[in-house]
Image: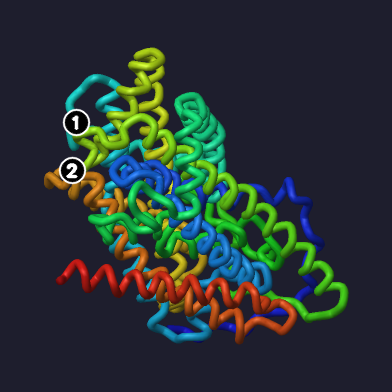
Amino acid sequence: MSKLAPLKKKDLPKPLPLRKLIGPSFIVLGVGLGSGELILWPYLTSNFGLGIIWAALLGITFQFFINMEIERYSLVTGESIFVGLTRKFGRLAPIWFILTTLIPWMWPGIMAASATVFAKAAGLPYSSLTGIFLLLVLGGIYSLGSVVYKTQESFQKTIILVGVPFTIGLAIYFATANDWLTLVRGVAGFGEGFRFIPKGLPFATFLAALAYAGAGGNLNLAQSLYVKEKGYGMGAFSGRITNILKGIKENVALEGTTFETTKENMLRFKTWWKRINIEHGLVFWLTGAFTMLMLSLLAFTTVYGNPGVETSINFVIGEATAIAQKTSPYFGRFFLVMVGIMLFGTQFSVYGSNSRIAAENLVIMNQEKFKIGNIAKYFYVFLWAQLIAGMLILASGFTEPLALVTLGAVLNAISMFIYTGLVLWLNSTLLPKGTRPSPFRFVFVFLAFLFYGGFSVFTVFSYFG
């Protein structure tokens, strides 16, 4: 591994207005939309009721604070969190991040779920060919865009702004006064005959849902790449990954640029920090939390306690059936189509974020062999490698979406436990004083570290036991 160059020094750019900062959080929200919001939490709710929904709010709140520490590093240094972690912890860091990104996330469970609901909406039996076709469409969309970040942001904005209001509207329409009361009690941890944890709850699935209450796994770390390419703070001096197939190229810097802690720079930093907290709070935390609550409420009001929801994503099919019976068959079918599109959008951002993470860490691992100027090529190599692997997995008969999603999520939860501690350590020691985490944020992120660690150890021992 070639040695990383020291950070250069420039003045911190003037803070952008809030409206120009909106964007990166749509991607990280979209990553979680099709896993935690649409699959795992509604699945758990349809089987165990709303008494567990407190954990969804806790999970996304933990992820908000973790994500902001990830953004903090790139705001101050203009480089990715992966470069910072390599500076702090050495040459094994990029190898670790490549493996812990690709292995947990290569399972196309979300795309299998998308193919399942699309097939049901069309009145056709599920076939692995449907999932394979969707993976090819996914690769085609990335290959047509000019700037990878812009492609992801635009795609996720469209899906979220159309799909989320529709599903929320359905939940509000179907929920009774008692359902709303049950939801409020669930936020406080009161379930039907239990407090916080119901008897028989599968802890692997519960840990998976906690990990996916937001984005999950190393994909939270990708937020660093997106805020950098959006031009947050010192990221204005970095380049973006463009489409090599269109001959568009920007200079991409691996090592970053920081600033002297002068009075003017610190005033600008405080403004930047306030505004990016608002952006992430509104788009990721508030929208994500409200969406999880409404989708879980919809699952509860339509299929809770019904036979057949114990396995797979049958609860989604059950929801569509209930919607069709109480409104119109067209609404039931449209619900399935919207769910399929949102799931597709999640797999879209997952594979894009994976490829971006792997490409970045490949260059960090050996800058002499893997040039930063070729990072766009590495992105597309990793993208199509994942797509081909996904096609092979689907063609081999691994068609159970929930099992694939749960497997990946448990691995991601363990990864989150490890990197949460590393990021907190990095920001508390390497960043200049005045830009480091406040005591409140330090404690909250440390609690997240302990929470994910304790649950990961418990789940692993329970599984092998």
Q: Amino acid at mark 2?
A: Thr
Note whether residue 360 is visible: yes
Q: Which quadrant is home to the C terminus? A: bottom left
Residue position for label 2: 399
Q: Residue 161: x and y, percent?
A: 56, 34
Q: Which quadrant is home to the N terminus? A: bottom left
- Taking the image as shown, residue 79 lies to the left or right of residue 291, namely right
- Taking the image as shown, residue 434 lies to the left or right of residue 369, namely right
Most foreground residue, 308 or 1: 308
Residue occupying the point 31% across, 32% down: 303
As drawn, 221 above or below 158: below
- Callout 2 secondary element: loop
- Callout 1 secondary element: loop
As drawn, 277 above or below 337: below
Q: Residue 347: x and y, percent?
A: 37, 46
Most foreground residue, 182 or 341: 182
Most foreground residue, 204 or 355: 204
Residue occupying the point 79% across, 63% down: 271
Q: Residue 198: x and y, percent?
A: 31, 55
Q: Amino acid at mark 1?
A: Tyr
Residue position for label 1: 126
Q: Are marks 2 and 1 in contact (CB under 8 Å)?
A: yes
Q: Residue 353: x and y, percent?
A: 44, 56
Residue occupying the point 40% across, 70% down: 452
Q: Residues within 10 Å of mark 1 (few under 14, many from 20)?
A: some
